[in-house]
Image (spheres, rainbow, N blue to C red):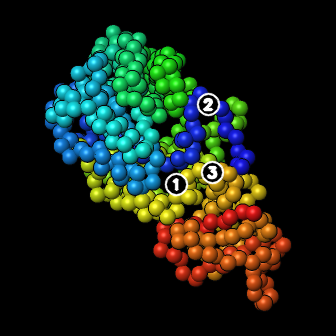
Amino acid sequence: MSSYVTRKTPGDTAWFTASRFGMFIHWGLYAMPARHEWVKTRERIPEEKYDKYFKYFDPDLYDAKEWAKRAKAAGMKYAVMTTKHHEGFCMFDSAYTDYKCTNTPAGRDLIREYVDAFRAEGLHVGFYYSLIDWHHPSFPIDQLHPRRDDKDAYEQSKDRDMKVYAQYMRDQVRELLTNYGKIDVLWFDFSYGDPEKGSTYDNGWMKGKSKDAWESEKLIALARELQPGIIIDNRAGIDQDLWTPEQYQPLDWIRHKETGELVTWEACQTFSGSWGYYRDESTWKSPEMLIRMLINTVSLGGNLLMNVGPTSRGYMDKRAVDALGVYENWMKYNSRSIYNCTMAEPEFAAPADTRLTQSVDGKRLYVHLYAYPYAHLQLKGLAGKVDYAQFLHDGSELKFTEGGVNHFSEGAAKGDDLLVIELPPVKPDVVVPVIELFLK
Ligand code: GLC
C-alpha cells in the first residue's frame, strides 16, 4: 500500500484521487467575442455592448452527448463545467436572474444537458461557479471589474450591497445542488485581496473580496447540507477538499501551508493560453507536453483537470478535438499507470529523463520514458524487487538483469542494487512509452 497520507477533508475524495484525470469546460457568452473569457473586463465592455452576445447566443450545434463521449474516450473520469463565469451569465435555468441561457436563442438549460450526458457516460459531474460577477447590479465595483475606470465608478458602486449578492449566490448554489441530482464537485472561483498599494485602484473604496465578502461559511455549509459528499475547492477562501494550482506544474506534492501535511490537489491547465474559446490564440501545447503534464501530475500525487473551451455554436473545434485525441491514443494503452496510481514510494528513485508512478496497492511501478535511452535503462535500488517487466502499451516482455549491465567490456555499469532493463533500439510509436514493473 502507498505510504502517503493526505490531510483529511470534509468531502469524499476516494473516487477523485483514483480517477486522476478530468475535463474542465469553460463555456459562456465569451465564446462569441472569442478572445478570452475575461474579455468583458479586459476591454471594459459596457453592458449594452455585451448584451449583443446575449441577444445572439445560439449554440445550435451543442451536443452534450458528443462532449461526454469525447471526454470518456480521452480517459477523463469526471468533468467540471462553468455554470456561471465572471461575466455573470448563467448557463442554467435560474429563478433568480433573467441573465441566463434560457432567455437567449439557445432557449434551453445547457447545464441540464451536460449533466445528463456526462452522467450517462458514467462520468462524475462537477460545477464551476464564479464568485465574481461582472453583471450583477449588487456586486461592488473593484479593481477587476469592467467598470473600474469609469469616472463615476464610485457613484455607480456606492449603493451596491454585497450582502444582497451573497444571498444571490446562496440561492443559485441551492438551485444547482438541488435540481440536477448528485453533484460530485463544486468549484468556486475566486478570492482576491485589496488593490495593490499605490495603484490606480488603491482609492480607499475598492476592496478585494474573500471569504467574508462571499459569506463563504454559509455558502459552504449550504453546499454540504445539500450534497454531503461533494468535493469543494479552496477558492472561496476556506480550506476544503481541493488545492488548485492553475497554469503551472508543481514540482512537489503540495503541502498544507501551516501543518505541512500532504493535501489533495488538482492542477488545472489549458490546451492553449485561454480558458474560454479564443479563436486567434495559437500557443497550443504539443502532444508531448499534454501527456507529460498528466504524468508529472500523477507522479506527484495530483489530479489533472484539462480544459476545453467550446465554440459559441457549441462544438469543440478541431484543435481541441486533436488535443483530446492525443490523450485518447495514449490513455487507451497506458491508463494503468494513471488510474489508481500515485507518487512512487520514496525508496524508488527515477532515473534521468523518467517519471515514476506507482499503483496505490503498491504492487506495480511505472517508469515513463521522456527521452528514449539506448538499449538499457538502469534502475538503482530495484535489484531483487522486480518479478516481471513489460512495456505497458503492448504488454511485451522486457528482459532485465541484476547487478549491472550485461557486457564483458570494462566499464560497463555494475552495482549490487542495479536492475538493468534491456530495451529495443528504436522507441516504440508511443508519445511517452511506459515500462510496467510487477514488484515482488
Ligand atoms: C482563473 C480565471 C479564470 C478561470 C480559472 C480556472 O482564476 O479567472 O478565467 O476560470 O482561473 O482555474
User: 432 or 277: which is nearer to us?
Assistant: 432
* Ligand 1 under 8 Å from disc 1 Cβ: no
For residue 148, above or below residue 339: above
Nearer the viewer's eye, disc 2 or disc 1?
Answer: 2
The quarter of the displayed image where residue 138 is located = top left
Q: Which amino acid does the dot numbered 1 rest on?
A: Leu
Q: Which amino acid does the dot numbered 3 rest on?
A: Thr
Identified at 27% across, 26% down, the residue is 93
Q: Secondary structure at mark 3?
A: strand
Counting from the top left corner in percent of width and height, residue 310 is at 30, 46
Q: Which residue is mark 1?
A: 294
The quarter of the displayed image where residue 439 is located = bottom right
For residue 410, above or below residue 131: below
Q: Secondary structure at mark 2?
A: loop
Identified at 19% across, 27% down, the residue is 103
Q: Is residue 50 left or right of residue 26?
A: left
Callout 1: 10 Å neighbours few (<14), some, many (20+)?
many
Identified at 58% across, 39% down, the residue is 14
Identified at 51% across, 22% down, the residue is 224
Callout 2: 10 Å neighbours few (<14), some, many (20+)?
some
Q: CA distance from mark 2 to mark 1?
A: 24 Å
Q: Which residue is mark 3?
A: 342
Any part of residue 125 in sight: yes
Nearer the viewer's eye, disc 3 or disc 1?
Answer: 3
**Disc assigned to residue 9:** 2
Callout 3: 10 Å neighbours few (<14), some, many (20+)?
many
Q: Residue furthest right?
A: 416
Q: Secondary structure at mark 1?
A: helix
Counting from the top left corner in percent of width and height, residue 375 is at 63, 81
Q: Quadrant of the C terminus?
A: bottom right
